Image (spheres, rainbow, N blue to C red):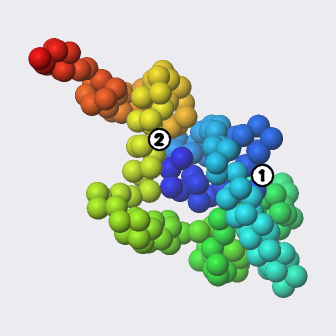
């Protein structure tokens, strides 16, 4: 997922029974389904537990709403206060919507996550430059190296044009998974 897609996940978008996440309104306004690695399920469940505690506190204080897309907000005026529409990754503090003046909980801000990611990279001792988008590139690279076809990767990444996805095929041409040098096949005696 793109960073913004992950941060804007709602509780209803996680489907643990099918091991899937529904990415709503991704780039280009399209929805898509991506897999949930089983190794992340315990962490996601713990995150949902923490988010639910925050949601319950908001409900008790009469501040239970989150932003809803315009048409849905008109059709289901109370949906923004329901648990299913709450953010998986809510911001710690409330914010005031500059357009409406409504005080409510927003999802985690991109910059908040990026700063935390930068601290985690440093704490892990990683010296190569890395951003959250690096994880997206790594995912695409590993899926291709595992032998999945380019169209599957295109669909998972939400690329409208396969040419965008083709950028990741460079890893198949060199290195361990790519063309080998003939020198490596010579028996040195």
List the residue tagged with mark 2. Answer: 139
Mark positioned earlier in the residue sequence (2 or 1): 1
- To which quarter of the image does residue 10 belong? bottom right
Task: Evaluate whether residue 16 shows in this view.
Answer: yes
- The quadrant of the picture occupied by the C terminus is top left
List the residue tagged with mark 1. Answer: 12
Mark 2 crowdedness (10 Å alpha carbons): few <14, some 14-19, many ≥20: some
Q: Residue at x 41, y 36 (%)?
A: 141
Q: Secondary structure at mark 1?
A: helix
User: Please, is residue 87 above or below residue 1 in the view?
Assistant: below
Q: Position of residue 61 (x, y in %)?
A: 84, 85
User: Please, is residue 141 above or below residue 182 in the view?
Assistant: below
- Viewer-closest of 6 and 104: 6
- Viewer-closest of 130 and 88: 130
Q: Residue furthest front?
A: 189
Q: Position of residue 15 (x, y in %)?
A: 76, 44
Q: Residue furthest bottom?
A: 61
Q: Is residue 9 left or right of residue 134?
A: right
Q: Secondary structure at mark 2?
A: helix
- To which quarter of the image does residue 124 belong? bottom left
Q: Residue at x 50, y 23 (%)?
A: 148
Q: Position of residue 22 (x, y in %)?
A: 68, 43
User: Please, is residue 7 above or below residue 18 in the view?
Assistant: below
Q: Residue at x 54, y 47 (%)?
A: 1
Please state which of the two labelled residues, at mark 2 or mark 1, is closer to the viewer.
Answer: 2
- Viewer-closest of 142 and 170: 142
Distance in Å between CA atoms under marks 2 and 1: 24 Å
């Amino acid at each position: 997922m793109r960073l913004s897609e992950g941060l804007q996940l709602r509780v209803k978008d996680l489907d643990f029974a099918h091991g899937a996440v529904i990415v709503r309104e991704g780039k280009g306004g399209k929805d898509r389904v991506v897999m949930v690695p089983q190794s992340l399920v315990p962490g996601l469940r713990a995150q949902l537990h923490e988010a639910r505690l925050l949601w319950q506190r908001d409900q008790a204080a009469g501040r239970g709403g989150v932003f809803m897309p315009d048409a849905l907000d008109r059709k289901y005026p109370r949906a923004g206060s329901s648990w299913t529409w709450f953010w998986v990754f809510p911001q710690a503090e409330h914010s005031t919507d500059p357009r409406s003046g409504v005080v409510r909980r927003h999802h985690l801000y991109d910059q908040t996550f990026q700063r935390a990611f930068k601290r985690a990279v440093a704490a892990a001792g990683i010296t190569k430059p890395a951003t959250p988008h690096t994880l997206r590139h790594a995912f695409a690279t590993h899926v291709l190296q595992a032998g999945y076809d380019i169209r599957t990767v295109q669909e998972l990444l939400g690329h409208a044009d396969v040419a965008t996805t083709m950028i990741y095929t460079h890893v198949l041409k060199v290195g361990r998974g790519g063309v080998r040098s003939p020198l490596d096949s010579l028996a040195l005696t």
